Amino acid sequence: MELLLQQVLAGLATGAIYACMALAVVMIYQAIDHLNFAQGEMAMFSTFIAWQIIQWGQPYWVAFIAAVALSFVGGVAIERILFKPLHNAPILSNLVGFIALFSILNSSAGFIWDFNIKTFPTPFGTQPLLGGGLIDTHEAGMIGVTLLMLALLYLFFRGTRLGLAMRAAAHNPESARLVGVRVGWMTALGWGMAAAIGAVAGMLIAPVVFLEPNMMLGVLLYGFAGAVLGGLTSPLGAVIGGFAVGLIENLAGTFIPYFGRELKLSIALVLIVAVLMVKPSGLFGRPTVSRV
Amino acid sequence: MTAGPEETIAFEPAPAARTGLTARLQHHHLAIAAVLTLALVAPLAAQSFVTFQLTLVMIYGLAILGLNLLTGFNGQFSLGHSAFYGIGAYTAAILMDRWDISYVWTLPAAGGVCFVVGFLFGLPALRLQGIYLALATFALAIATPQLLKFRPLEPLTGGVQGIVILKPDPPDFVQHALSGLHLKPIDADQWLYYFTLAVILVMFTAAANLVRSRTGRAIMAIRDNPIAAAAMGINTALYKSLTFGASALYTGVAGALGAIAVQFVAPDSFTFLLSVSLLVGLVVGGVGSIPGSLFGGVFVLFVPNLAERVSTGLAGAIYGVILLLVIFLMPSGAAGFARMLAARFGRRSRSI
């Protein structure tokens, strides 16, 4: 029983990383209807910017806010310069655009800041908090910030005119344009917000996985899995999906005898695919949302 | 006019367009003949490393053709083709290394195994579309290298170490025939090149014929409008699964050829990144274009090396910039670009 509790806590701690990323993934999916493969690299680049500002002697929160603001601007700029011209191109061309962006960001980060592993500070400290040291204050803070971002996003999308306009632009661009929503700028705004959320996620994840150009690859892939499991249309679903991926991965590794440990990622993915067989648009995908 | 009767029926050109079509078909045949002549002569003039690279280009082209059958012609999305490539490669390596089976027979075996795996994977994938199908195939791409490393399977797969296989020598009858003609004997690289070329020719021709057939039209109808296709009496579930199988077969045969050419298989050669490369090759070559797949192979093999040569530190960035340039300049791939050039050229010559 105690082992189970420990593994659940450890799973939630890993899951928080995935949930953070899944939230950013869903944000951009809402805005542009595509999965952005470069999302993780954008977050990594933002985290490097924050690291650089801290290296220049600024306090953590100055770096944090500057990195989030710069990422927002960067996200909007990437949309305007690179992806607006591809607006009418086939999905696969967009996908290759993401792969190109991924490659450019990854390689330039390595070129500017080299590939050595760097430590990144956390504002929450790393004292053990619960479960005999399995979850510490940073991990708890990460879960807290993820939930806070989720709440803010919920309020933004449900409670403001701009949020409504963004949802309209993503859901039905033609009709949105007819009622006066500037769809192009809503998309750019979505990119900016996704980049900013990605920056927060990157800065929360970096103390755990350490800062280096390839730090986000694994995280992003499981963030995707979490987002798809939760349903790509639901931010809440993405967060729950992210936590679920972390939990399944940990529990499968511990409790499935013989091959659980070696194949735990495969098992997690196979389970997710099995869930998708039953609910093809994810656990909290659009059908459920529209009924509520 | 050399075009067969099926082609005329398939295209049903309007009378006014008929002469243009005939001319285009002849251009087409001329182009194929030219490329083929070049392909036959190339290894005689090139260094053995270049010959080896050209062999790899054809192999990647074949793998991309497999992905193209699924994505370009059937509209199903896959991030899991590295798995089929890997399964094909391992099938060939295990048969050659553990059971001493001739490399020639490993190709149908690899194709068969991959067809079955692809078909079976295609069945549950029927319920999934778009992004969700991408995730399912992504799971396949992640699971395959892990399974290949899986310890209980090590006696078969060689675990992390992989399997080393020997490069096949040219068969005696070829050398005899060459010496009979007073020609130089060919080396192993050249032989493998010609062997691959022969396989590629058969498989590309088969794919072109498949796409033009009744089955091919059913496959494309499902891509264009699944509901209308089903209403016309096409068994969409069966055709989608069969396409998945055929696509896996092509990529699997490419994998087997790749294993023979590289003489080595290891789990980490068949990761998700290989799937991404194949996808890039598909888009760059032209989605839904059979000759475009070969251009995709050229891009996948040479452009990363080219970027590396320009700048080692920024190789990835340069690769990315080239990729962006390609999709901005040729939004529908090399095949679309060629079509556009042909159309412009054709119009000018008519106006003169």
Image (spheres, coloured by chain):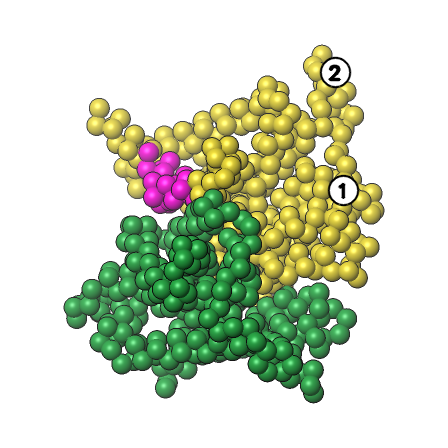
Chain colours: A green, B yellow
Q: Secondary structure at mark 2?
A: helix
Residue sitting at x 27%, y 81%: A159
Q: Amino acid at mark 1?
A: Val
Secondary structure at numbered mark 1:
strand
Q: Position of residue B79 (x, y in %)?
A: 53, 56
* Furthest residue in direction top, as rendered: B182
What's the amino acid at mark 2? Ser
Q: Residue at x 36, y 64 (%)?
A: A62
- Can residue A36 be seen from the camera position used here? no
Q: Position of residue B307 (x, y in %)?
A: 48, 36
Residue mark closest to the camera, 1 vs 2: 1
Callout 1 crowding tier (Cα within 10 Å): few <14, some 14–19, many ≥20? some
* Nearer-N-terminus badge (1/2): 1
Q: Which residues are magenta?
A: B320-341
Question: In the image, B244: left or right of A107?
Answer: right
The quadrant the C terminus of chain A occupies is bottom left
Which quadrant of the figure contains the N terminus of chain A? bottom right
Q: Residue furthest front?
A: A57
Residue A142 image position (x, y, % from top left):
48, 74
Along the line of sight, the residue nearer the viewer: A16 or B24:
A16
Q: As rendered, which of B208 and A18 lies closer to the eye?
A: A18
Give the residue number, with chain letter if any, for mark 1: B164
In this picture, is B262 found above or below B162? above
